[in-house]
Image: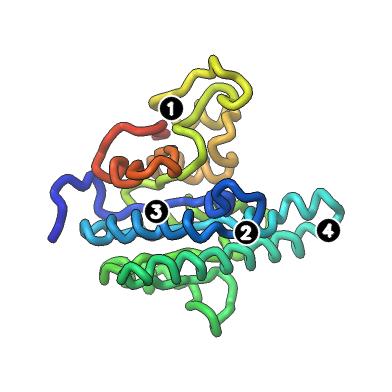
Amino acid sequence: MENNQLAYRRILLKLSGEALMGDGEYGIKPAVIRRIAQEIHELVEMQLQVGLVVGGGNIFRGAGLAEAGMDRVTADQMGMLATVINALALQDAIEKFGTPVRVLSAIKINQVCEDYIRRRAVRHLEKGRVVLFAAGTGNPFFTTDSAASLRAIEIGADIMLKATQVDGIYDADPAKHPDAKRYDRLDYDEAITRKLGVMDATALVLCRDHKMPVRVFNLHETGNLRRVVCGETIGTLVE
């Protein structure tokens, strides 16, 4: 039964690979991925259409490998494959709650998931399936933040939700500066020019040019995802 409290019909959720690590230093923590899967399952039960882009930083970071001397294109391709691993893990965790999931990859890897086709993705969403967009944009030099912005625009999402480890966007790192100020709302140009680190400039420019609002919030507080989709003013809104 549809929940009339929902503020949106279709969302794109961006998860970092690091979000899957919990308090670990590498890989996937089963308890963390189970909690995230349960919260996503609950959204689908509310009749919300959920698309999701996940990073790969808990396994490989292309930019980091390139800085260490690896060819940048090769490093980014490894990073793309890491996002496929994370997407498959999320698919398994969400399906255990009884919610159907499809993984769509921007690079061809047909034996483990489907190719990304926009119309197919939209159809899956309309049928109540969670769609996990893997392998970024399929191109080197683009972050998974840019991939999330692109997919949000392509599928006609109402909003892009960027899940982080802090409760919004600050004017300085709150872990290092206890007096850092949190913004409730920013416009795209402010976020770009102030270099606040919310997303890379390419991702923000995409959202700005296509009027895709972005809400940045803390995923690690249980229930925040539900609160956000019900319209509570949690975190920072960029629009």
The residue where tag 1 is placed is 186
Seen as rendered, the residue at the extreme top is 179
The residue where tag 2 is placed is 27
Q: Are marks 4 and 2 in contact (CB under 8 Å)?
A: no
Give whichever of discs 4 and 3 has the lower sequence position. Answer: 3
The residue where tag 3 is placed is 12
Q: Position of residue 128 (x, y in %)?
A: 27, 68
Instruction: Identify the secondary structure beneath mark 2.
Output: loop
Q: Dividing the picture into quarters, in which one does residue 56 lie?
A: bottom right
The answer to whether any part of residue 69 appears in the image is yes
Counting other residues with Cα less than 10 Å from the Cα at mark 3, is it few (<14), some (14-19), or many (20 or more)? many
Q: Amino acid at mark 4?
A: Met
Horizontal side of 159 relative to 16 (left or right) equals left
CA distance separating discs 3 and 1: 19 Å
In the rendered view, tell whether residue 7 sits above or below residue 76: above
Residue at x 70% of width, y 60% of height: 76
In the rendered view, tell whether residue 167 sits above or below residue 116: above
Q: Are marks 3 and 1 in contact (CB under 8 Å)?
A: no
Q: Are marks 1 and 2 in contact (CB under 8 Å)?
A: no
Q: Are marks 2 and 3 in contact (CB under 8 Å)?
A: no
Q: Position of residue 201 (x, y in %)?
A: 58, 39
Q: Quadrant of the N terminus?
A: bottom left
Instruction: Identify the secondary structure beneath mark 1.
Output: strand
Residue at x 53% of width, y 70% of height: 105
Q: Quadrant of the C terminus?
A: top left
Q: Amino acid at mark 2?
A: Gly
Q: Nearer the viewer, mark 1 or mark 2?
A: 2
In-front residue for pair 59/116: 59
The residue where tag 4 is placed is 70
Total numbered circles: 4
Q: Position of residue 231 (x, y in %)?
A: 25, 39
